[in-house]
Each structure stands twice: as structure tokens, then as C-alpha cells.
Amino acid sequence: MNNCLFCKIIDNQIPSEKLYEDEDIIAFKDIDPQAPHHFLVIPKQHIATINDAKDATLLGKLITKAAELSKKMGFDKNGYRLIMNCNSDGGQVVYHIHLHCLAGRKLNWPPG
Ligand code: AMP
Ligand code: ZN
């Protein structure tokens, strides 16, 4: 039995504020936003970390959809940040890959 939090969101066993869904990916609002706007784009396929990802088309789709949603929500002019954390040093907490999109304020660089 898959005990993955994001697989449960995909299966609607756990509620989320969905922004987009198709046969391959979903996007939903982050429950603990780190910026005025913070959403996640994830594949429906369970892939634990970016180390395990082999499907370049699927990964490209995560990025292009994050950009498309960002444009639709009007973040494109001021800008936004896309991040994928990997394993403990990268700050990964949920082991189902997800692309973070953060927007709505000036983001620090370099990140902490
Ligand atoms: P990461 O540290 O890259 O693994 O990020 C995991 C992200 O998932 C964090 O930003 C969390 O706030 C977010 N998160 C955890 N549980 C939920 C949930 N039920 N719905 C939406 N986002 C969540
Ligand atoms: Zn999963």
C-alpha cells in the first residue's frame, strides 16, 4: 500500500486546492505558503526524488505548466521562482517529486 501524501492528494483521499489537472500531472496550492503565492506541480506517477526521474518529457511538462500557470496568474512580469528540492540537504520533506512555484514578493538569493 502506497503511503505517499501526494499520491493521496492525486487520488483525492486528501483534499487540496487544485489549480490544474490532466492525465499526467496536477498543480495545487501549497498548504504552508512561503510566499504570497506558492503552488506545487507534481507528476501523477510516483517518483520519489529527482534522482529517480528518467522521463524528460514529463519533467518538461512540470516546468512548462508551472510557467503557464504563472503567466495566467500574472506573476510573469515581476517574476517567480521554480524549485525542486532533493533529499535532506536539499530540504526535501515529501518523497514524491514536486516543483515549487513561489511568487508575489522579492525572493532571497542565495536561498538559506
Ligand atoms: P519539500 O520540502 O520540497 O518536500 O516540500 C514539501 C511541500 O509540501 C511543503 O512546501 C509543504 O508545505 C507542502 N505540503 C505538505 N503537505 C501538503 C498538503 N496536504 N497540501 C499541500 N501542500 C502540502
Ligand atoms: Zn507518491
Image: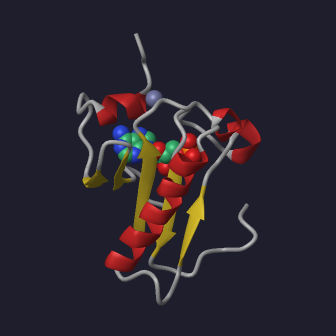
Report the quarter where the C terminus lies.
bottom right
**Which quadrant of the rendered structure holds the N terminus?**
top left
Which color scheme is applied? secondary structure
Residue found farthest to the bottom = 77
Q: Is residue 21 rendered to the left or right of residue 95? A: left
Left or right, 52 with reference to 31 = right
> Do we see residue 36 in this rendering?
no
Q: Position of residue 27 (x, y in %)?
A: 36, 53
Q: Is residue 20 visible?
A: yes
Residue at x-position 50% and y-position 67%: 102
- The quadrant of the rendered image in which ligand 2 is seen is top left
Q: Residue at x 62, y 41 (%)?
A: 92
Rendering coords of residue 40 (x, y %): 44, 53
- From the viewer's side, name the closer residue of 23 and 4: 23
For this rendering, which residue is in front, 26 or 58?
58
The quarter holding residue 16 reads top left
Residue closest to the far top: 1
Q: In the depicted view, which residue is nearer to us: 33 or 63?
A: 63
Where residue 71 appears, as percent x and y from the top left, is: 39, 78
Looking at the image, is 71 positioned above or below residue 77?
Answer: above
Quick check: 105 above or below 10?
Answer: below
Is 108 rendered above or below residue 55?
A: below
Q: What's the residue at 45%, 32% (across, down)?
A: 45
Tell me how many marks there are: 0
Q: Position of residue 99 (x, y in %)?
A: 53, 53
Up-down: is 61 above or below 10?
A: below
